[in-house]
Amino acid sequence: MKIALIGATGFVGSALLNELANRGNDVTAIARNTGENDKVNWVKADVTKSEELSRVLENHDVVISAYNPGWENPNIYEDFIAGSRDIQEAVKKSGVKRYITIGGGGSLFVAPGVQAVDTPDFPKEYYPGASAARDYLNIIREEKDLDWVFFSPAFEMHQGITTGRTGKYRLGLENPVFDADNRSILSVEDLAVVIADEAENPKHHQQRFTAAY
């Protein structure tokens, strides 16, 4: 497949890039600075310039966005919403219909009508970014022209998870997936497997989904 990957040098994007390239896909890796993977076509692009980005995205089978303005960015809420809107617009202008975007797990429902981001124990330092992802999910739910998918990672999906690539996972939709120990956990390598599987064999359309062990 011909896949455009936005945010290809970040924590999630790097894992995705390796998974997609190792499967033999034709990957256009889009980032502010090019990386070292020589199996892909690197393109420097600014996601806030939708006209420029749309031209890069043309003629791909699917666009995957791992865009994140940075957890330590003091303007993460505004930048996440604006950047995500710009990317969505660029995908529409490009003519590509299939769009997979990776958001946060904070918008998953942990009780009827209660999202994780609004619970007392949710880490305050992650609230701006998590609430931005939640609000963007509500925005993209209104998108009727694209065959979009919004992925919410497991609650525990960070650099401290050292499981590596197992290729195993379980899927969910609006609620987190918990294991026998009541943990919602997934390595970044297996997150990449989930997204690559969804790109190659679509199971979700105009909806949010999640995955964990």
Image: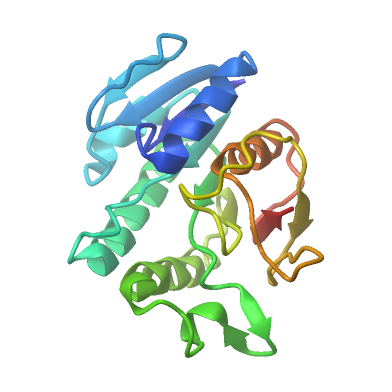
**Which quadrant would residue 198 be assigned to in this image?**
top right
Q: Is residue 93 visible?
A: yes
Q: What is the residue that sits farthest to the right in this orientation?
A: 180
Residue at 72% over, 64% down? 173
x and y, in percent, of residue 144 in the image: 57, 59
Q: Is residue 110 left or right of residue 161?
A: right
- Above or below residue 49? Residue 176 is below
Vertical comparison of 57 with 171: above or below: above
Report the residue at 72% width, 51% height from top.
Answer: 204
Give how far across and how far down residue 21 sits, in percent: 55, 18
Residue 146 in the figure: left or right of residue 69: right
Q: Residue at x 46, y 80 (%)?
A: 122
Determine if residue 25 is in view.
Answer: no
Q: Is residue 152 above or below residue 20?
A: below
Q: Position of residue 133 (x, y in %)?
A: 43, 66
Task: Give the farthest residue toward the top.
Answer: 38
Quarter of the image holding residue 10? top left
Residue at (66% x, 64% y) in the render: 184
Quadrant containing the N terminus is top right
Name which quarter of the figure residue 202 lies in. top right
Way the structure is coloured: rainbow
All told, the count of numbered labels is 0
Q: Is residue 106 left or right of residue 58?
A: right
Q: Nearer the viewer, residue 35 or 143?
A: 35
Provide residue 16's location: percent of width, then percent of height: 52, 33
